[in-house]
């Protein structure tokens, strides 16, 4: 090989620089790739797949490619895959379990492994899926599988502690899609962290998770006259902020708002307090795991949780004296789920 001869290294070393750079020193990889670029060499992934019988592709399946949470994940996965000579095939299920099942069958035939984010499939189907394919799950905590959880539990505990310290006692959690592991974790984290504080929590759900449907649920969200709203993600939080503005309710003067995933925080007015999550880190780690070892072997079950961080900005503040009028307004109840949490001893 011309590159190997030019640099005085083994052809296998040149191959590793493109297929498994983690096995070499960074300076060696840099020298080989620089020389390859100067010589006009481009590795032919398709030819290599034909010779080995293994397509060097990874299938990445997400529930909603338009949700701001997923583009950063997709970009990180693509870049990590490029370092090992892999290509990422991306598919969007639109949050539909049957569509997800069909996509898994199609991508599975074209990929050496699959990374499935926020799977909506029933648990029984997940078990049978991992028996037949190299699959890693993101944000689906199913025992016996290989999974990475992009967790907000610790950060939400810090968030509620901060809001309680600011004097808040009337909370609303506005959840997202019902089958979402992330929503279950976030709702549970808020409930657990408020338990024993004497605070009141009301929970409701925006099944579509969209801004428009959040705006349409204004009466439900405001029914209990909350002073603090914690949203499933930044999209819902944005909707909450705008509906409050439409009702003439000040943020954070009368109601504090917190989002989750930190994707829209700097585009809202005022800038949104949110939970910054490690989606890109999770995607890079997922790619590293699925490209390791033999493609003929199933992935070893493991559970990795990456905790997020609370990023406080301008949408939370103390319960002010001037919000008493807002608190006295008659609530409009539309079938919300309300919990009176026990007071601490």
Image: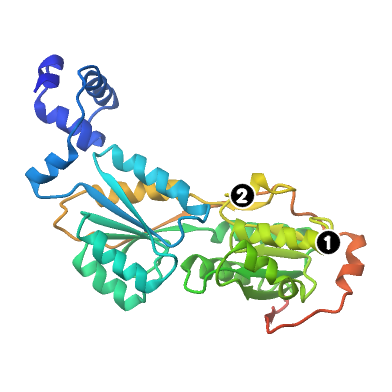
- Position in image of residue 28 (x %, y %): 24, 23
Looking at the image, can residue 23 be seen?
Answer: no
**Can residue 15 be seen by looking at this rendering?**
yes
Would you name the residue on which mark 1 appears?
249
In percent of width and height, residue 228 lies at: 74, 64
Q: How many labels does the image show?
A: 2
Quadrant of the drawing holding the N terminus:
top left
On screen, residue 124 above or below 326 = below
Q: How is the image coloured?
A: rainbow
Residue situated in front as seen by the camera: 40 or 274: 40
Q: Name the residue under label 2.
A: 264
Label 2: element kind: loop
- Using the numbered discs, state the Cα–Cα distance from disc 1 to disc 2 in whole angstroms: 21 Å
Q: What residue sits 62% from the left and 72% below the top?
A: 191
Instruction: Report which quarter residue 26 is drawn in.
Output: top left
Residue 338 position in % (x across, y down): 69, 81
């Amino acid at each position: 090989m011309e590159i190997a001869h030019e640099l005085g290294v083994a052809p296998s070393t040149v191959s590793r620089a493109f297929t498994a750079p983690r096995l070499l020193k960074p300076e060696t990889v840099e020298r080989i790739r620089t020389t390859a670029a100067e010589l006009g060499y481009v590795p032919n992934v398709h030819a290599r797949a034909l010779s080995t019988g293994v397509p060097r592709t990874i299938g990445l399946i997400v529930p909603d490619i338009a949700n701001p949470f997923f583009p950063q994940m997709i970009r990180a996965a693509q870049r990590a895959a490029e370092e090992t000579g892999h290509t990422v095939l991306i598919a969007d299920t639109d949050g539909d379990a049957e569509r997800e099942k069909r996509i898994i069958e199609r991508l599975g035939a074209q990929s050496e492994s699959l990374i499935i984010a926020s799977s909506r499939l029933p648990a029984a189907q997940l078990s049978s899926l991992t028996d037949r394919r190299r699959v890693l799950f993101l944000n689906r905590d199913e025992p016996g599988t290989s999974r990475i959880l992009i967790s907000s539990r610790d950060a939400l505990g810090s968030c509620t502690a901060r809001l309680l310290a600011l004097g808040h006692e009337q909370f609303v959690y506005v959840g997202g899609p019902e089958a979402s592991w992330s929503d279950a974790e976030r709702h549970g984290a808020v409930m657990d962290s408020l338990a024993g504080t004497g605070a009141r929590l009301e929970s409701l759900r925006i099944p579509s998770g969209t801004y428009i449907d959040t705006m349409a649920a204004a009466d439900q969200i405001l029914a209990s006259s909350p002073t603090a709203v914690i949203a499933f993600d930044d999209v819902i939080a944005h909707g909450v902020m705008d509906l409050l503005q439409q009702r003439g309710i000040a943020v954070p003067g009368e109601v504090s708002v917190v989002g989750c995933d930190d994707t829209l925080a700097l585009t809202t007015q005022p800038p949104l307090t949110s939970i910054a999550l490690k989606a890109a880190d999770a995607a890079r780690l997922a790619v590293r795991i699925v490209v390791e070892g033999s493609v003929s072997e199933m992935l070893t079950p493991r559970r990795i949780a990456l905790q997020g961080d609370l990023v406080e900005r301008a949408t939370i503040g103390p319960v002010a004296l001037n919000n008493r009028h807002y608190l006295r307004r008659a609530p409009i109840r539309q079938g919300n789920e309300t919990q009176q949490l026990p007071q601490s001893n």
